[in-house]
Image: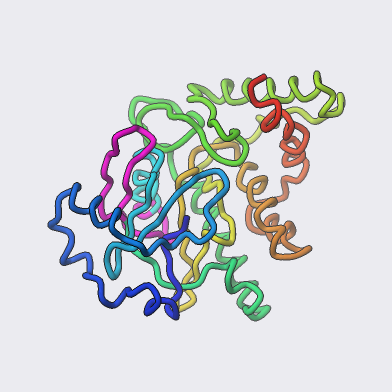
Amino acid sequence: MAPSVPDARATEFGQESLKPWSDLQHLSDNALIGLYRESKLDLVADPHPLANTSVRLIGRDTVIKFPSISPSEADTLRLVKASTTIPVPSVRRFIPGDRPDANYLVMELIPGRTLEACWRQLSLWRKFVVVWTLRGYVRQLRRVPFQAARHELRPGPVGEEPQECNGLFFTDYGAGPFLTYGDLVEWFTHKLNVAQRMKKAPPTATPFDQSLPLVLTHYDLAPRNLVLDNNNNLWVLDWGFTGFYPKWFEYAAMAFAWEQLGWYGRLMAQLIAGFYEKQRRFFSDISWALTTGVMM
């Protein structure tokens, strides 16, 4: 779901024949949607299993992501750009769709290579730089303040009102909205109770850790969402699942995604997001309740 394209594939995608955003920005929302529907240049070769998302090139430097689940993704990108030094795509426009969960997000295209595609070709030093850079990014995110006016800090996506949570640990159907941290804890505790009742989790399973604060969490820092540009700047893409979650969530989500890079993948995730292996095991214990037993 990453709006990036390797430079070597620019010709294949016919990128140079397309217009720049400066020639497209005057178009109406409907005209931009028309360009999206006409485009055959889909940059998502292997969609995320939790989201049937398309990212299509509509201009030389512009893509449209559809569906964008809510305005939260655009709000998050603007918040991160304003509050950190993390390189993220600029939001060109957010276009509401026919359904609340089917919006169009117009974004800057980031040329480069995903870590998924180039990791094995990187030198040991470059890999270290990537890991250390990501470590800094995660720490910046954790310092971003909760922005919703008139509301105390609560779990879930960025926005004025509580929203449904989506992503790896919230089932294929989403969960929430959660009005308080306690509501989030109660939801996960129920999932553990279900797993234990069905004998899919041990009676001695560690309960949900609510001792750490809610912090801004990308929640999908997978190698496919990290792009090295021509100057070796590391860009972070796909903020659709981002929200304020317990501090250990970032590691728990990364541990699964980074294992594909080799036996040391989980160690790198720990260096980047912290040592929360004990907390991560909670999700292994409730996995049956999040999948097969999701309706219980």
Q: Horizontal placement of 283 versus 45: left or right? A: right
Closer to us: 163 or 106? 106
The answer to which quarter of the image holds residue 68 is: top left
Q: Residue at x 55, y 40 (%)?
A: 167
Q: Position of residue 98 (x, y in %)?
A: 29, 35
Q: What range is drawn magenta here?
A: 81-106
Q: Quarter-wise, where is residue 73 in the image?
A: top left
- What's the residue at 33%, 75% (across, down)? 14
99 within the magenta span: yes
In percent of width and height, residue 292 lies at: 70, 30
Is residue 51 in the magenta section? no
Compared across the picture, whether 134 is left or right of 271 comes to: left
State the quadrant of the C terminus. top right
**Exactly how many numbered labels are in the figure?**
0
Q: Is residue 235 toward the left or the right of residue 222 in the image?
A: left
The vertical placement of 295 against 99, above or below, is above
Q: Nearer the viewer, residue 158 or 237?
A: 237
Residue sitting at 81 percent across and 23 percent down? 196
* Image side of residue 144 versus residue 57, left or right: right
How has the structure been colored for display?
A: rainbow
